[in-house]
Amino acid sequence: MNKILIVDDSTTTLSILTENLLDKLDNIEILSAKNYKEGLKYIVEYGNKIAIAVVDLHLPDSKYGAMLEVTDSKFIKTIVLSGTLNDKVKKIIFEKEYVIDCIAKDGKKSIKSVVNSVNREIKNRNKNILLVDDSSVQISIAQKLLKKMNLNVTMAANGKEALQIIKNSEKTFSLVLTDYHMPIMDGMELTFRLREIYDKDELGIIALSSNTTLEIATEFLKIGANDFINKPYLETEVVTRINANLDLIDLFNKTKDMANKDFLTGLYNRRYFFESGNIILKKSIRAEKNLALAMLDIDNFKNINDTYGHEVGDTAICEVGSLIHKYLRSIDLIARFGGEEFCILIEDIKLIDVENLFEKIRLAFEKNIIKANDSKLIYTVSIGVFYGIDKSLEKMLKIADDALYYCKNNGRNQVKIKDLTKN
């Protein structure tokens, strides 16, 4: 639970900001203080458990900026929200190590800005940034700024090293910040190489250069950079550009999820299953590795809807994904095919492990209890499995579906495996 401290002498601002934060963000708790004394009490009580503070510079029971002095000294990431902000004040504020944003009070616009800033700060904890520069001085300046933004930073001294890091790292990078002039491989070549692998909606690239020639910025953008920043840069400019690019990538990912995932369960949909499944199949054919493709269906699902209602039926469907995920690896593919039918694709697995896995899944459903209103719902599943390899994913699905049909016609609540490796 992320604790957000808001310190403002306006009860209206406190109320509206609290309402908007709770409405837009998940897993947060608001600590609301209308003066310096109340804010200080929360800081003493919770200390570093406070994820972010939103503070006004003018408070009735303290000198100007006193609350900011406290949050900065206690290493609390802080957003300044104030009615009087000019460039001189902003410069002084941003010199504070833990200030992440500075927003002028401007009605609904400022409230939205605070919500976005808090949201981005929380999201940044899971964002990996690759910083590429051969200058230790520039690396130190940029690294300090990125860490202040709550981003996870990895460094590389040139383009070649950056490519090796991306290729070998277990991390998923959201953004690359690269200098232009570097030995071995410069930022232009790095951008070109990265765009051969990643699209703009997969990996953001921001180029930084002290070369002010217009053609350099244009060339970077032409070969695939998302943005270009001239050195020396203002901290506020870099923060704004980075956050804007991260927001755009998040929007791309959200759009992909909406297109690829089932609305009810959050599992992948049929279309995505065929796209990814065919890639997995080709990979397995090249490696000469067997696959397990399973069709799973809830037994007597119509009776569940008729007896308990469609709302409980939806709960039963959602339970499938939650339960199955406990037994699958992160690389295994599961999708809802429609209604109460699901498909699972597992690569590089032995037959004995297939038998054990799906028997465990069948038993898990048999023992699982769902509370439905004042009743307890227990339901079983039937599972038909194709094991082996074939050039056609559709043919594999047909064989798995035939095995599922066998289960349905022979008592349900069972697993039937068609082992094609024997042919």
Image (cartoon, rainbow, N blue to C red):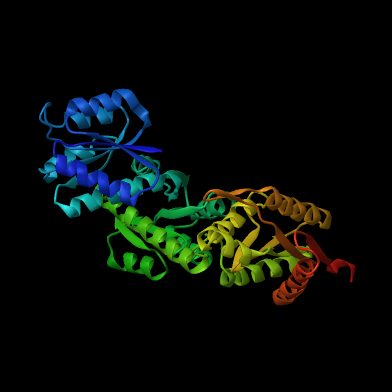
Give whichever of 330, 183 is nearer the camera.
330
Image side of residue 124 versus residue 385, left or right: left
Q: Pinpoint residue 7: horizontal percent, then vertical percent.
A: 21, 35
Rendered view: 222 above or below 246: below
Q: Pinpoint residue 193: horizontal percent, then vertical percent.
A: 51, 64
Give the quadrant of the N terminus. top left
Q: Is residue 292 visible?
A: no
Res 302 quadrant in image? bottom right
Q: Residue at x 14, y 51 (%)?
A: 106
Rendered view: 396 above or below 237: below
Give whichever of 321, 165 is nearer the camera.
321
Image side of residue 354 versus residue 334, left or right: right
Give whichever of 298, 353 is nearer the camera.
298
Q: How many marks?
A: 0
Q: Residue at x 68, y 63 (%)?
A: 299
Q: Is residue 137 visible?
A: yes
Q: Pinpoint residue 16: horizontal percent, then vertical percent.
A: 21, 47
Res 306 quadrant in image? bottom right
Give the quadrant of the C terminus. bottom right
Q: Pinpoint residue 418: horizontal percent, then vertical percent.
A: 82, 67
Give whichever of 185, 167 is nearer the camera.
167
Q: Residue at x 67, y 62 (%)?
A: 344
Image side of residue 316 versus residue 382, left or right: left
